[in-house]
Amino acid sequence: MIQLFSSDTPNGKKIGIMLEEIGFDYKVTKLDLAKGDQFKPEFKKISPFAKIPAIIDHSNNNQAVFESGAILIYLSQRSGKFYDKKNKLNIDQWLMAQMGSIGPMIGQYHYFYKFNKGLSDVGEKRYFEMTKSIYEVLEDHLSKNKYLAGENYSIADIATWPWLARHEWHDIGLKNYQNLSRWYSEIAGRDAVVKGYAFMDKSAVIPKP
Ligand SMILES: N[C@@H](CCC(=O)N[C@@H](CS)C(=O)NCC(=O)O)C(=O)O
């Protein structure tokens, strides 16, 4: 059994979706980030930077893992799914692009544009431009590739999709990006994604493009 320490955010949803995709038994331990649960010493023992998500794998010697990309790799190795060794380099590149660029840039956009509007015009403008350019790069790439790492759905898609699932916050217009919308809708139609999206709030419904 996997214990998932999480909150209902894009980084949290990645792991909810992965666990549904691989069909592992799991239970969610909810952290209230606004109240500072992440800073409790017992949580920092498994997640030193005090960030969700983190897991403890009770079926594998209580192995603890932090960082969503590392958790996705760990779970794909445990299950043998969504991380095809023959396509490892492509998957690694798009997974690292999510971890290093897509997530951090869109995360900052949420910070300035959604949660702190009016605080900084520079912050809002900078991260709007960054997020728009991420949409453009993904649109171009998905005009030539079915999924981020090529022909098959992989942990790179699982890592990236929850960030696009916040598109209603972005005011960029996902539906104007035909190939990105096609990829988004196709993934949104997977049963495991529907369940994983609602891993914390059973009433959560995936936004349409
Ligand atoms: N690189 C980390 C980022 C995790 C992250 O930023 N988590 C946020 C929620 S989405 C968090 O725990 N924030 C709490 C805080 O910053 O105090 C990962 O992908 O796991």
Image: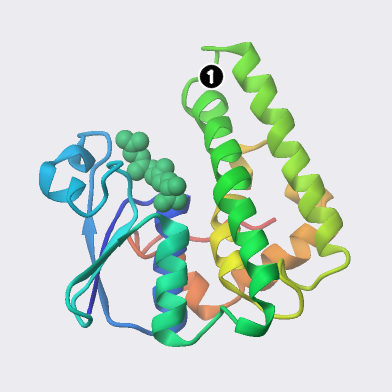
Give percent across and percent down for residue 92: 62, 65
Relative to the observer, which residue lies in front, 151 or 88?
Answer: 88
Q: How is the image coloured?
A: rainbow
Question: In which quadrant of the rendered view does residue 134 lie?
Answer: top right
Give percent across and percent down for residue 159: 54, 61
Residue 166 visible here:
no
| Amino acid type, label 1 | Lys
Relative to the observer, which residue lies in front, 69 or 192?
Answer: 69
Question: In which quadrant of the rendered view does residue 206 lie?
Answer: bottom right
Query: Quick check: 75 above or below 23?
Result: above
Question: In which quadrant of the rendered view does residue 171 lie?
Answer: top right
Query: Quick check: 34 above or below 179?
Result: above
Residue underneath mark 1: 117
In the rendered structure, the answer to whether residue 48 lies left or right of residue 143 reads left
Query: Quick check: 73 above or below 164?
Result: below
Q: Secondary structure under badge 1?
A: loop
